[in-house]
Image: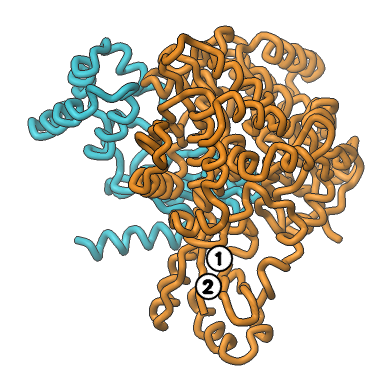
Chain colours: A orange, B cyan
Amino acid sequence: MTFYIPQDTTALALGADAVASALQSVGIEPVRSGSRGMFWLEPLLEVETNKGRIGFGPVTAKDIPSIVDALESDPARHTLYQGEVADIPYFKSQQRLTYSRAGLGDPVCLDNYQALNGFKGLNNALKMTGQQIVDQVKDSGLRGRGGAAFPAGIKWQTVHDAGKDGCQKYIVCNADEGDSGTFADRLVMEADPYQLIEGMIVAGLAVGATQGYIYLRSEYPVAHKLLNIAIDRAIAANFLGENIQGSGKTFYLEVRLGAGAYICGEETSLLESLEGKRGMVRAKPPLPAIEGLFGMPTVVNNVLTLAAISTILEQGADSYQNFGMGRSRGTLAIQLAGNIKRGGLIELAFGVTLREVVEDYGQGTYSGRPIRAIQVGGPLGAFLPESQWDTPMDYEAFAAIKAMIGHGGIVVFDDTADMAAQARFAMEFCVVESCGKCTPCRIGSVRGVEVIDRIVANENRDNNLILLHELCDTMEFGSLCAMGGMTPYPVRSALAHFPNDFLLRDAAGALSQDARGSLSGDAAGAAQGEH
Amino acid sequence: MGISQNEQQSISALVGQYTQLPGALLPLLHAIQSDLGYVPDSAVPIIAKGLNLSRAEVHGVISFYHDFKTTPVGRHTVQVCRAEACQSMGSRQLEAHAKQALGIDYGETTADGAVTLEPVYCLGNCACSPSVRIDDAIYARVDTDLFDDLMSGLLTEEGASK
């Protein structure tokens, strides 16, 4: 029997190391795998038996003796028994492409990666010209997964065609996954880092870049450690460096750590930071594809975009583009988070509705109370009331309701949420994280906090509400990037769908009993999280 | 703030290692901070000279990023996540409790020098909120009781290592 216990951040945060020690103390050396992304079951202990790969979760160190006993008799009788892991409905119903390997084995084991189809895409790419690779990416319909959803193939074509022959070009991976409610990039880096490395090498071959950087946020110490191990091993096995696998092609790769600035997830700010400067947003044009890192043509793609490249090159553009709806092709890494019973990573073709995700997969709130609002797309995403939960997860469908899918993070709030406080937080976050280059964002956010405070305190409320709407317009239309430009989204949606939270406050500014009583009278009507 | 000659030398040695690296400033600042626990003001001219930058440029970068500290911090850094997913699971109460239990506000260090408390905006552990980071370890589903246990665990650990 082989035992697997994950080493990803969430499993570790829930005590996976203690479980591993408990196994070792009874003479079992577990494989430290990545996570499958079913975080509500972490730490999920998997055991390869002659009856299949079965799971127990969530386990603690003190469960180990009874699990070991049960394995010798009838595992199904153990209270934490989950059956065959691949048959758990939450997992089985997913369409896993990017996460097909996640959780199966040791994430930094090269043999394991290659046994599970790893580097097949690279081998295909090594036989192609740069233009042929770019064409594959175009045909796949892949759009950038960082949030802006720009067609990846067109960006690559621009970099392919840019600059003089032989000029230095760069591949930059945006791994500054700062949106609350997102962990898809982290899971790729912690559960399948070679997939990202492979995608970056292919990108380098496609556009003629020989140097890559992964700009990783400093809040991800586990990913940092695993990426560096994976890169060292890939260099030793000649997948990185000079003359890759005897092809004559060169690609170097390095991880660079951010320093706690949300704005550096914006691509031009990220490039400034990589150059060793303050993370100030650049005006566009010039596009980074033409004048990017150190002024040279640069592909900047999100982790998931680059990870998808290895699938596309392995299975072909047609196969990838068969998933999805409309102009949103392939799969979306949905991250279910916040106040949710069964949070985790759900990879599905575009088109599933928010309600299906939250109710069928998530099974309602963790607190057991009704769901009140759902924020999709991070701190710059709108708060959606129940009337909007049947929107399919598709870039265009979300844009049509003034919301965004962004990086695919979903944060659920129960009926105790104070939406005026959440609107204030959106402005406050912008105060803390604005790079300061443009006035609407730098000053507007400060004024936004003040105006919301006055509204909640019932100071000249009607006029201040008008002022807040005007301020939102100024920020949306006057800011240089999405930081100031989209901070109004959560604010406006809170005002539109949860107006009573701004109005029915007691003298101390707290939500009054009247407001609590009227929560069920939200513009959207009551939402039932439980089924 | 004055630093010892040893510290000056170690900063100079680190700067020497990074002069050839493209975009060296952030990796260098991380290295200095990892070595000394913070980036002292007296490091600024050494860095500026080594990387051929102005002092203003170096200072500007240090002050831009939340991670870089210009004064010594506690032996442990405790970060409480303030982002939305954690808020939906009660992190506002948790942060109030953390400040009260430690007797300090964000950005401050306890009188015994053990703990510096900081806010953080997302640790990527959002399916099992609220999250807390202590040095390089992240903890999930942290309620006020678990927070107290973690803090007393830190003090016990410190006592044992003395």
Tell which residue pokes out farthest to the bottom in this image: A73
Relative height, residue B6 to residue B141 (above, below): above
Q: Are marks 2 and 1 on the same chain?
A: yes
Of residues A167 and A357, the one drawn nearer to the viewer in this rendering: A167
Please tell me in which quadrant of the rendered image residue A53 appears: bottom right
In the picture provided, is A190 more to the left or to the right than B49?
Answer: right
- Using the image, tell me which numbered label, if any, was put on residue A60: 2
Vertically, is A316 above or below A82? Answer: above
In contact (CB < 8 Å): disc 2 and disc 1: yes
Residue A191, given in percent of the width and then of the height, sits at 52, 53
Vertical order, A225 against A211 (above or below): below
Secondary structure under tag 2 reads loop
Residue type, numbered disc 2 = Thr
The disc label shown at residue A43, or none: 1
State which chain disc 1 sits on. A
Residue shown at 56% from the left, 49% from the top: A187
Question: Residue drawn 65% across and 40% down?
Answer: A312
How far is mark 2 from mark 1, CA to CA? Answer: 7 Å
Residue B52 placement (x, y as % from top left): 23, 13
Q: Secondary structure at mark 1?
A: loop
Q: Nearer the viewer, residue A322 or B51?
A: A322
Asked if one can make out residue A178 in the rendered structure from this viewpoint, the answer is no
Residue closest to the eye, A11 or A369 = A11
**Left or right: residue A229 compared with residue A106:** left
Q: Could you say which quadrant of the image residue B16 lies in?
A: top left
Q: Quadrant of the C terminus of chain A?
A: bottom right
Residue appearing at x 35%, y 30% in the figure: B68
**Residue at figure coordinates x 73%, y 46% from the top left:** A412
